[in-house]
Image (cartoon, rainbow, N blue to C red):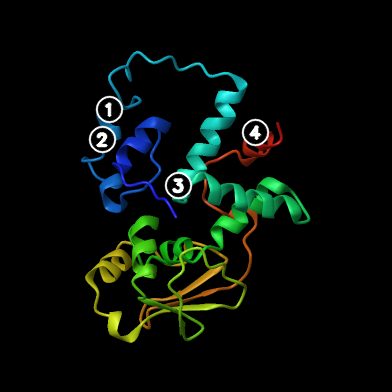
Amino acid sequence: MARYTGPSCKLCRRERQKLYLKGTKCLSDKCPLEKKNYAPGHHGLNRRTKYSEYGVQLREKQKVKRIYGLQETQFRIYFDKANRQKGVTGENLIKLLERRLDNVVYRFGFAPSRKAARQLVLHRHFLVNGKIVNVPSYLLSPGDVVSVKERSRKLDIIHNALRRTKENLHNWLSVDKANLQGTFLNLPEREEIPLEANEQLIVELYSK
């Protein structure tokens, strides 16, 4: 599966808002968006900012896709799955993305970013219900328990991330920092998910 390997900060600049792709760097003065709040490239400063209807929809799709670290094919698969489910397609899409193992590891506070969480999952540092799962796209179900593998419990990246995480950030998750494990309690409602996005624009884009 192809993946983006370029500078993460350029993606934030392209969307002109913080996507929090670099963990602690996004919260510091080193964030390039603090000094260069315009699109990257030679003509970034002069690029027109007024988008067409299609452009607005496209930018929203690109933003959400980049936040969760997905390529177009992967993202479209999630959309098609959300479209087949009962309920509001846009909300179904966001809920599916929130169920990804790499996202939940990030939400638990075990990693400083989704990119770091994906790498930790790929390197087999996490268990789901007592079994090693190294698939970042694994979809969690209510009641699933995610824990750090015994041999990985001294990793600095996990402990440093946990120290920066506040308690009980999300109602659908329960985290036990002492035992380095968390429980996916239930599917979140859309209003509970801290994501600044208008998913209806994505639905409209794919419905053309």
Using the image, tell me which numbered label, if any, was put on residue 32.
Answer: 2
Q: Is residue 126 above or below residue 12?
A: below
Quickly name the residue at label 1.
36
SS under mark 4: helix
For disc 4, the marked residue is 205
Asked whether the residues under the numbered discs 1 and 2 touch, taking CB atoms below 8 Å apart as contact, a structural biologist would say: yes
Q: Secondary structure at mark 2?
A: helix
Q: Amino acid at mark 1?
A: Lys
Q: Nearer the viewer, mark 3 or mark 4?
A: 4
Distance between the Cα atoms at labels 1 and 2? 6 Å
Q: CA distance from mark 2 to mark 4?
A: 30 Å
Tell me which amino acid carries mark 4.
Leu
How much space separates mark 1 and mark 4, taking CA atoms? 29 Å
Residue located at (51% from left, 83% from top): 129
Q: Nearer the viewer, mark 1 or mark 3?
A: 3
**Residue sitting nearer the eye, 26 or 131:** 131
According to the picture, the residue beneath numbered tag 3 turns out to be 67
Residues packed near mark 2 inside 10 Å, few (<14), some (14 to 19) or many (20 plus): some
How many angstroms separate mark 2 from mark 3 (CA)?
Answer: 17 Å
Q: Amino acid at mark 3?
A: Ile
Which of pointers 1 and 4 indicates the residue nearer the eye? 4
Callout 2, which amino acid? Pro
